[in-house]
Amino acid sequence: MQLSLLRNLFAAGLLSAALAFAQGPGGTIYKVSITNITKGQIISPVIVATHTDTAPPLWEVGSPASDELRMVAEDAMNDDMVAKLGSLAEVLDVKVIMGAGGPIMPGETASAELEFTGPYRWVSAVAMLVTTNDAFTGLNGVRGPNVGAGVHLAPAYDAGTEANTEMCAEIPGPPCGNVGVRMTEGAEGYVYIHPGISGEGDLTSSGWDWRNPVAKFVIERL
């Protein structure tokens, strides 16, 4: 899957893997796992956080994406979102879940352990579907389990910050490799459920399309 391209694409994301923020007293542990359940899309390293129910949502369907979300959804650039979450008093712990090679490949499961305590029992996560203009998936304020594990199936969302040209000139993931190139003319301007890959540009629907959901999240109390 063009490993050199993937290394370049996720260089910034890999730097974020060492970052973990902890605020407030010590607590218990949630193990958060994500499985890529698409056939062909690669999921970027996943930002995941534990927080209170008063923390601002990572996105709101029908509303414009934040700059931090835009950077994740367009180019899998995690640093600004990690930093923003780490600065919030409502957030206890932030990690970046990595696959074996950085990104999470189709069929692969990756996980990380996060601290939770008291009111910091909610979990949010976000990552890019890399062979798209601005598609992402994740969790947006899910209550962690008191015991055992909870399973959550997540769809793909469109950040609405780029037009869905499906042209390699504006897509960071394989087979394209154009990080940081945007086509904003025709962007929808709000977050919505992604319609998938139509095959009208450089990408074939047989190779890169999906049917929701695209990711399975498991939150387990250890």
Image (spheres, rainbow, N blue to C red):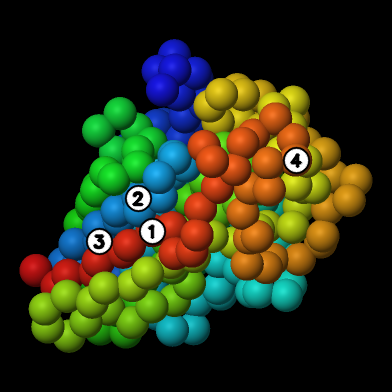
- Residue in the image at 9% along x and 69% along y: 222
Name the foreground residue: 173 vs 210.
210
Residue to which mark 3 is pinned? 32
Spot the residue most to the top.
Answer: 4
Name the foreground residue: 68 vs 20.
68
**Disc 2 element:** strand
Give the answer, above or below, for where 23 lies relative to 121: above
**Residue 182 lies in quadrant:** top right
Give the answer, above or below, for where 167 lies relative to 89: above
Q: Are marks 4 and 3 in contact (CB under 8 Å)?
A: no
**Residue 6 lies in quadrant:** top left
Q: Residues within 10 Å of mark 2 (few under 14, many from 20)?
A: many
Sooner in the amino-acid sequence: mark 1 or mark 2? 2
Residue to which mark 1 is pinned? 215
Give the answer, above or below, for where 123 lies relative to 202: below
* Residue type pointed to by label 3: Val
Q: Position of residue 105 (x, y in %)?
A: 35, 38
Distance between the alpha carbons at the discs numbered 1 and 4:
25 Å
Sooner in the amino-acid sequence: mark 3 or mark 1? 3
Please state if 117 lies on the left or on the right of 44 as rendered: left
Q: Are marks 1 and 2 in contact (CB under 8 Å)?
A: yes
- Residue in the image at 55% along x and 54% along y: 136
Residue to which mark 2 is pinned? 36
Distance between the alpha carbons at the discs numbered 4 and 3:
36 Å
Give the answer, above or below, for where 85 lies relative to 25: above
Q: Are marks 2 and 4 in contact (CB under 8 Å)?
A: no
- Residue in the image at 19% along x and 62% along y: 31
Q: Residues within 10 Å of mark 4 (few under 14, many from 20)?
A: few
